[in-house]
Image (cartoon, rainbow, N blue to C red):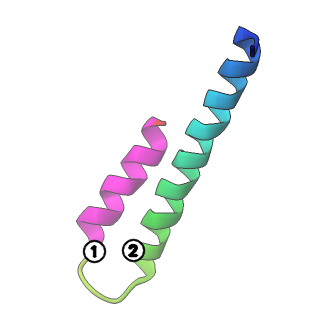
Amino acid sequence: MKRPGQIKQELTRQWVEKAGKDYDTSSQLLSAAGDYFEAAAFHARQAAEK
């Protein structure tokens, strides 16, 4: 059985990983040709909120 501290650490790592993916997605959308500004802004905000 995991200790509460271990569980918290694992959940925090997962949350930071998700924020990184949102940030990467936002960056890729801004670099892509096309009108993806709104989608990029959405993912940037998601990353910031996490």
* Residue under label 2: 29
User: Quick one: label 2 or label 1, which is nearer the N terminus?
Assistant: 2
Q: Residue at x 39, y 45 (%)?
A: 46
The location of residue 10, given as percent across then percent down, is: 69, 30
Q: Amino acid at mark 1?
A: Tyr
Picture quarter containing residue 4? top right
* Residue under label 1: 36
Picture quarter containing residue 5? top right
Q: Is residue 48 magenta?
A: yes
The location of residue 49, given as percent across then percent down, is: 43, 36
Q: Would you say 30 lies left or right of 34 here?
A: right
Q: Residue at x 28, y 69 (%)?
A: 37
Q: Which residues are magenta?
A: 36-49
Residue 19, labelled with which disc? Answer: none
Q: Residue at x 40, y 74 (%)?
A: 30
Main SS of the magenta part reads: helix
The location of residue 16, given as percent across then percent down, is: 61, 41
Q: Residue at x 53, y 64 (%)?
A: 24
Residue farthest to the bottom? 33
Above or below, 43 relative to 13: below
